[in-house]
Image (cartoon, grey):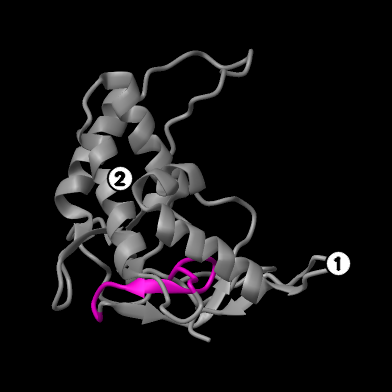
Amino acid sequence: MKRSLLITAAVVLSVGPLAAAETPRDYTALVIRFARTFMDKGTDRYGPVHSPLWAAALDLNTLSLPTDSPKIPAGPRIREGDRCWKGCNPYLDTETIRAFYELSRRTGDMQYRQAAERYLSYFLEHCQSPTTGLLAWGEHTFWNLAFDAVDRDIHEFLVWLPLWPEMWELNAPAVRRAIEGIYAHHVFDKKTGLFDRHASYSS
């Protein structure tokens, strides 16, 4: 049976101007439907500790974490494994979190922003390495919702920046430790700025 997945990071509420050739359409109702469903079914209901963390993917048949690894076709620069389908990854949820903030701004209903803030606040408080200060997110590392622990030890940023300003408002000390951890463990030469995108989350 082909498995259908809802990937949270793929949901984006556009805030930019429409291209001239596009016909303006209002997708707000669809985004609200997604957001309400996700707030009800997409948070952490797994493992010993339940939390406001968001699942990185949901099985659309059960609206819960997939029970087995989705089949990912191999291709150039596409990894068949090393995915966060059984956990939480705010780095890959950046645009979805931004959409929740924007949805509250557009509708005046603060429940969406509050859900995003609960997610980020919990993540900053519970998912940071006490040794390096790095957070359990990125291209490889994620927080495993079933085990309530970090999964994989390779910390990597790629392509986009996290929501530093929003997170700073919620927990400035944790964000400072994370940024200092990036400097300490990703920047190998402090004089030249030589940067390695990979680092160990735990040491």
Label the magenta part by its dominant secondary structure: loop
What residue did someone put label 1 on?
192
Q: Indicate the amino acid at tag 1.
A: Thr
Residue drawn at x 46%, y 43% as measured from the top left: 95
Res. 187 image quadrant: bottom right
**Is any part of residue 137 visible from this angle?**
yes
Res. 186 image quadrant: bottom right
**Is any part of residue 90 visible from this angle?**
no
What residue did someone put label 2 on?
116
> How far apart, in angstroms, are the residues tagged by discs 1 and 2?
37 Å
Residue 60 belongs to the span the image colors magenta:
no
Residue drawn at x 25%, y 36% as measured from the top left: 112
- The region drawn magenta spans 133-147
Residue drawn at x 36%, y 24% as measured from the top left: 27
Q: Which of marks 1 and 2 is in front?
A: 1
Residue 136 belongs to the span the image colors magenta:
yes
Where is residue 92? Give x, y as percent: 47, 56
50 on left or right of 130:
left
Instruction: Answer few, some or many: residues within 10 Å of disc 1's Cα (few below 14, many 20 plus, some between 14 and 19).
Output: few
Where is residue 201? Give x, y as percent: 51, 79
7 on left or right of 33:
right
- Report the front residue among 116 and 78: 116
Query: First in sequence: mark 1 or mark 2?
Result: 2
Res. 200 image quadrant: bottom right
Instruction: Answer few, some or many: residues within 10 Å of disc 2's Cα (few below 14, many 20 plus, some between 14 and 19).
Output: many
- Report the front residue among 108 and 166: 166
Where is residue 142? Give x, y as percent: 42, 71
